[in-house]
Amino acid sequence: MSDKKTILSLMQPSGDATLGNYLGALKNWQKLEDEFNCIYAIADLHTLTVRQDPAQLRKNSMQVLALFLAMGLNKGDNIVFAQSHVSAHAELGWVLDCFTYTGELSRMTQFKDKSARHADNINAGLFTYPCLMAADILLYQADMVPVGEDQRQHLEITRDIAERFNNIYGDVFKVPEAYIGKAGARVMGLQEPTRKMSKSESANANNVILLSDDLNQIANKIKRAVTDSDSVVKASPDKPGITNLLSIYCAVTGKTLEEAEGEFVGVGYGAFKAAVAEAVVEELRPVKEEYERILKDKAYINSVIKDGAERAGRIAYRTLGKVYKKVGLIPPVR
Ligand code: ATP
Ligand code: LTN
């Protein structure tokens, strides 16, 4: 890899990717290729913290990978792979478990939220999730991690773990920073605009736009989105529905909020929603075409992630070797 800084991010294949994942994460990752060495993976091991249907998990994993490739995240020197294909993640995760306190882990808001939502399966993996995520990042000596607001606390604990380890053993890990790009949109549910659009909570199909929905379905979901009581197209905290549609429109067109509001002065909600639908459909049309094509070509996806795992592994096992040596494990006899 070149001497550019390294940026890394993973996405859980916990469902099919949503418009939220696309606008809030993937579209921003796409712009980083020139400036950074980019490493992207599916966090399939993390997904096991919530009970999965095996066939469905495999399907979701291929879909998320197909989307990565459709968006060109594997271009140039970028690396794309599956977390479970580089065993160093699980191995370093274990070591980091031993350098993380249960008190710290029990303060994680995601752990508290997920335990409340999956009260029948509060497993140890859900608890130590941040240690595996720290391993994902620290193995690659990543400088930057693009994270949404919801993952900030996990990045903070990663930094704490890295600093703790470095204080004992010397400079083993680079301490990563959050990458704050141009504000990615936070996309809310179309039917419940006060909650974020999320792939693992797509029970109400009209609430979530999936990248696998067909273009007509996508347009119809937007046209059926809940709006607010008056009929003025203006963002405001007491109008979460309209605010959400405006922010989607801005993220897709690159317009500012003022420009978008200006464009819809005197326009009714119906026509406004039709314009948002049209903009989203035109944005997604080429991505979806590429996505559908790649999804059918399993051999291509497999060849990219095989190569990705080999290249990722070369970096990861070097770091893991250093860690094993520092903590006092005897080198394996070969
Ligand atoms: P899950 O339902 O499993 O929690 P999710 O759809 O909420 O999944 P994550 O896998 O947690 O998404 O997030 C992957 C990336 O997508 C993160 O960088 C996150 O910040 C971003 N992201 C997820 N949902 C949204 C959203 N609604 N708006 C903007 N960004 C989002
Ligand atoms: N926890 C993240 C996914 C994730 C990740 C990572 C993100 C796992 N490992 C390493 C950045 C870096 C999520 O659910 N969005």
Image (cartoon, rainbow, N blue to C red):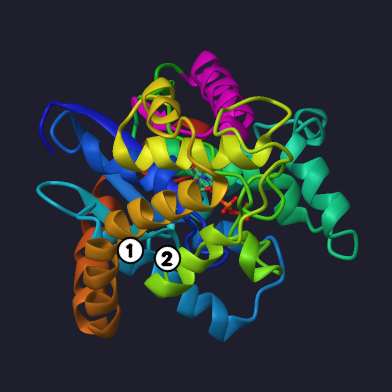
Image-quadrant location for residue 268: top right
256 and 262: which is toward the camera: 262
Query: Which residue position is annotated with label 2?
Result: 211
Residue type at mark 2: give it. Leu
CA separation, marks 2 and 1? Answer: 8 Å
Q: Is mark 2 within 8 Å of ligand 1?
A: no
Whether residue 334 is visible to the viewer of this picture, yes or no, is no
**Type of secondary structure dominating the magenta stretch:** helix
Judged from this view, the residue extending furthest toward the front is: 266
In the image, residue 226 lies at what x, y percent? 67, 52
- Tag 2 secondary structure: loop
10 Å neighbourhood of mark 2: few (<14), some, or many (≥20)? many
Residue type at mark 1: give it. Leu
In the image, residue 138 lies at what x, y percent? 43, 34
Q: Measuring 38% from the left and 38% from the top, which residue is drawn there? A: 251
- Tag 1 secondary structure: helix
Q: Measuring 68% from the left and 60% from the top, which residue is drawn there? A: 49
Q: Is residue 165 magenta-colored?
A: yes
Which of marks 1 and 2 precedes in the sequence? 1
Q: Measuring 49% from the left and 37% from the top, which residue is drawn there? A: 246
Q: Quadrant of the N terminus?
A: top left
Q: Left or right? Give the position of 105 relative to 304.
A: right
Vertical comparison of 293 with 134: above or below = below
The disc placed on residue 126 is none
Q: CB under 8 Å between callouts 2 and 1?
A: yes
Q: Left or right? Give the position of 130 relative to 173.
A: right
Vertical comparison of 306 with 5: above or below = below
Vertical comparison of 174 with 292: above or below = above
Image-quadrant location for residue 112: top right
In the image, residue 187 lies at what x, y percent? 54, 43
The disc placed on residue 67 is 1
